[in-house]
Image: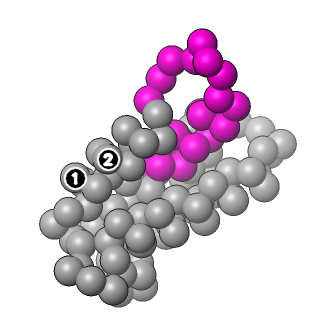
Amino acid sequence: MISLQETKEFLRVDDDTEDALISSLIVTAKVLVEDVLRRPLADFDRIPEPIYQAMLIVTATLYEERQVSKDKSGVSVTDTLDMIRRMLFAYRKGAF
């Protein structure tokens, strides 16, 4: 699982004011990634790099898109989930 510190470095967040939010988003990213994988991360002795990166990308997207407005442009959560499905396909189980 990714740590709070690693995630903050990825997000380029220097202070501690949003630690609770970021920690919550890490948990959400883990759930989403496990849902795509159809298996818990605990199944892996060592988390493969694409899975690690997928969790960081999901966390970053949720962090950046937490205040959605009509005029805001950027990567949508839907586009991000489509991308991580492709990133994680090789690690995905046929069913839970």
Q: Which residue is mark 1?
A: 86
Give me the residue at 52% from left, 59% from top.
29
Give me the residue at 70% from left, 31% from top.
67
Is residue 65 covered in magenta? yes
Is the Cβ of the residue at disc 2 closer than 8 Å to that at disc 1? yes
Asked where in the image residue 57 lies, by quadrant, the reply is top left
| Image height of 16 relative to 30, above or below | above
Q: Which residue is mark 2?
A: 82
Farthest residue in the right direction? 17
Give me the residue at 22% from left, 52% from top.
86
Q: Position of residue 25 (x, y in %)?
A: 63, 55
Judge the density around disc 2: few (<14), some (14-19), many (≥20) Cα neighbours within 10 Å: few
Give me the residue at 57% from left, 38% from top.
11
Amino acid type, residue under disc 1 in the picture: Arg
Judge the density around disc 1: few (<14), some (14-19), many (≥20) Cα neighbours within 10 Å: few
| Image height of 24 relative to 92, above or below | above
Whether residue 95 appears in this view of the structure is yes
Whether residue 49 appears in this view of the structure is no
Marks 2 and 1, how far apart in space? Answer: 7 Å
Q: Position of residue 63 (x, y in %)?
A: 62, 40
| Image height of 56 relative to 23, above or below | above
Coloring scheme used: one colour
Secondary structure of the residue carrying numbered label 1 = helix
Quadrant holding the C terminus:
bottom left
Amino acid type, residue under disc 2 in the picture: Asp
Seen from the viewer's position, the closer of residues 66 and 41 is 66
Asked where in the image residue 68 lies, by quadrant, the reply is top right
Image: magenta residue range: 56-75
Secondary structure of the residue carrying numbered label 2 = helix
Q: Position of residue 3 (x, y in %)?
A: 57, 62
Q: Position of residue 51 (x, y in %)?
A: 33, 62
